[in-house]
Every structure is written in structure tokens, then in C-alpha cells.
Amino acid sequence: MEAIKKDNFIDLRSKAEEKLKKLPKLLRRMSADDILDLMHELHVYQIELEMQNEELIGAQHRLEQSYEKYSDLFDLAPIAYFIFGRDGLILNVNYTGSKLLGIEKRQLIGKPLSVFLPGREGQDSFFHHRNLVFESETSQNCEIKMKRRNGSTFYAMMESIVLKDEAGRFTHFRSAIIDVSKQKEQERTIELALQKEKHLGELKSRFIAMASHEFRTPLATILSSLYLVEKYNSQHLEEKRLKHIHKIRSSVQGLGDILNDFLSLGQIEKGNILNNPVHFDLVHFMKELVDEFKSNSHIHTFVYRHRGGRLDVMMDKKLLKICLNNLLGNAVKYSPEGGKIEVTTEIKKDTVDVCFHVKDNGIGIPEEDQPQIFEQFYRARNADAIQGTGLGLNIIKKLVSIMRGDIRFTSKENKGTNFAMVIPQINPVLKR
């Protein structure tokens, strides 16, 4: 409409100019009345020209207001908008886009977006997205990683479209970009929560399987042994009575060990277990511990060695004893046919670390089970027939961590296992 009015104005103006050129000749041939009529006609043209001029000024003013209005809508939009030319250079960007990248608007004009895409992978993703928009001529979405001026990165959702004029000619490539880092973080949090829930479900299944086996068997043994003890009431059956009483005692002790594992784990997870180091003689402590196992197992051979000159150490004696009792107990339990169990302590020169090794020649840990062996309620596939809760190694790892140490192992199925604990001593000077 505005273009039509402008054409009318130009047409009127050209007609008036044409008549003015012919005016001198016309005036010589015209009468006074004709001249008056011509002057009236020119006056009408002048009025029409002024009206057209006012309309054009009004149209221009409205156009400027419309431009300012839509320019403000573009610049102040809450979504980042980028306008690109066919060559991929930024032609325009709103304030949200400028703020998103941490760069002033004037500094973005004329730059390629690839400058703000870290790594080759991000740049390739954008070019693939851009080509897809050109080929499909429809709006397309893609998730892309972007980089701010300060070097920090964020994840963005980009929606792009190609815009054309009325003749179908390319005008520009427009992209709307939204920072979705918070959504990605929430997705990650939900994913971790689901993984944790899945892990807890697995722990629950392992616990039920362990409890149904480890509690049922000793309870059945106790009940059957009590029944037989009642039957063996004659003096000549005393030996059989003692045998079943021993079974009852052993089963009750096994149940007690299971409950102790649960209590220990509960105390650790509540944060009630602390590292309380004391001075003691390492070799004397170790010999007492190994001798106790010697007296309780007659099918195993125990060998203890110490390397290093120092004997006096400073660490938590109570926590250390729990860990070593568990490791030696496992060495005995998982070497059902007996064999040699080697225990070694070592204090290397110029270090405060104490190394403990417990090595057996038992059933070993299958390679596929080794990554999970320290998890709660996890038991290797070759240990199903041997009593155990699957908590011992998990408790040891937590206690070693409390003592700021580390535990590792090497093992081969049917060849045995070698556990190594490295625990640092507390500096006696600092302790005082």
C-alpha cells in the first residue's frame, strides 16, 4: 500500500513538471480565462502533492516506528537469536545472544559461530545441522556444546531455519539458541539417582539371597543338633553329645559373626568409627595374631616374616586387628584343603607406610568377579558353597580408608590370592 501511494506521488509530480515545461508556449496562445483555469489546475496539483507528501511522511514515520518496535522485540527477546549470511558469518545478534557468549554485540558481527564451538566435534555438528536446514528448508533442532568468551562451556539447544523473500530468494539463516546446561545437570542427577536406586535394588537382592542361605543353614543345624542332644542322654553317648554341642556352638558363633559384620558396617556408615592411633610393637602384635589362627586351624601352615629395622609403629591397633582378622579368616576359609598362609609386614626405609601382605594358595578369585569383590554382599561365583556374608572385604576397604590407607590384591582362580594393605603411620611428633 505504501509503495502504491509513493507511485501515485511520483506520477502526479511528473505530470506537473511536464505541464510546467510547456507553460511558456501555452501562455502565449491562451486567453485570460484559460490562464485562470490553468492556475486553478496547478493549485489543485499542488494541494494533491502536499497531501501525498504528508501521507508519505506519515508512512515513513509508521515504518520507522514499526522497525523500532520489531527491533526491540528482537533485541530484548529472552531467547538468544543469531542471524547468519549464506557464508555463515553473523549478520546480527540480539542482546540475549551477546550475554550468552559474554561478548558485546558489535564484536560478534562478522564472526563465524564456529569460533564459539569447542573442538572439531562441535564444529562438525553445527555444519551438519546447517546443511540439514538448507537441504530440508524446514526448522531443525540440534544439541551442541558452546564456549563463552571466558572459556567456560555450556550445552545449548539450537533451532534453525532458512528465511526467504517473496520471490523465494535466500535472505538469511536464523538460529534460536537456549542454554540447557541446567536441564542436562538435572538429567545427570536423575540418571545418578536411578543408578543408585538400581544399585540399592541389587544390594537388596544380594542381601536376601545371602540371608536366606547364611541364616537358614546354621539355624537348621542348631535345631537338628538340639534334637539329637536330647536323644543322646545316656553316658555312653557322651562323645556324640559333645560333637553336636560343638556344632551348635560353631553355628551360633557363625551367626554372631554375621551380626557383627552388620553392626560394624552400620557403625562405619554412621561415621562412628574414627582413626585412633597408638604406639605398639608391630612384630609382637602380629605374632600374637598369627599364633591365634595357628591354634584354631590344624590343616594350615602359617608363616610370618617382618622386613625392616623398625618395630615400633603408631596406628589404630583396633581397626588394624579387625582388618587382619578378616583377611586371615578369608585365607583359611577359602583354602578348604589347607596349605600355607604367608603373612608379611614391611616398613621401607625413609617412609612412614607399613605394608601388610596376606597370601594363600586357595580357590582364588575369578577374573570376572575381581572388579566387584569389594562391593557389599558381593561374593565370587566359586564361593557359593562357602559360608560368608559378602561384607568382610567391603568393611576392610572402608576401615583402611578411615586409616588413610589403601588395599589391593592379585589373584588367580585355583592358584590363590595375595592381599596387600598399605597404611601410613601418624607422625609421632605431630601426634604429641
Image: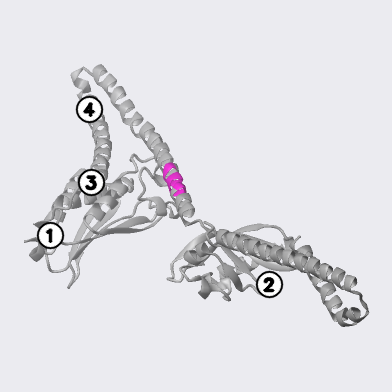
Rounded to the nearest angstrom, the CA distance separating label 2 from label 1 is 73 Å
Earlier residue among tags 3 and 1: 3
x, y percent for residue 196: 41, 45
Q: Looking at the image, which residue is at 26% across and 40% down?
A: 266
Are there few (<14), some (14-19), or many (20+) residues within 10 Å of tag 3? few
Disc nearest the viewer among 4 and 1: 1
Can residue 222 be found in the magenta stretch?
no
x, y percent for residue 368: 46, 53
Residue 342 position by quadrant: bottom left
Horizontal side of 229 relative to 154 (left or right) equals left
Q: Are marks 3 and 1 in contact (CB under 8 Å)?
A: no
Horizontal side of 229 relative to 316 (left or right) equals right
Residue 225 appears in the picture as rendered = yes
Residue 86 numbered tag? 2
Earlier residue among tags 4 and 3: 4
Residue span colored magenta: 190-197
Residue 230 position by quadrant: top left
Rounded to the nearest angstrom, the CA distance separating label 4 from label 1 is 42 Å
Residue lying farthest to the right in this orientation: 29
**Which residue type carries mark 4?**
Ile
Q: Are marks 4 and 1 in contact (CB under 8 Å)?
A: no
Q: Which residue is mark 3?
A: 271
Rounded to the nearest angstrom, the CA distance separating label 4 from label 3 is 39 Å
Are there few (<14), some (14-19), or many (20+) residues within 10 Å of tag 4? some
Q: Which residue is mark 1?
A: 314
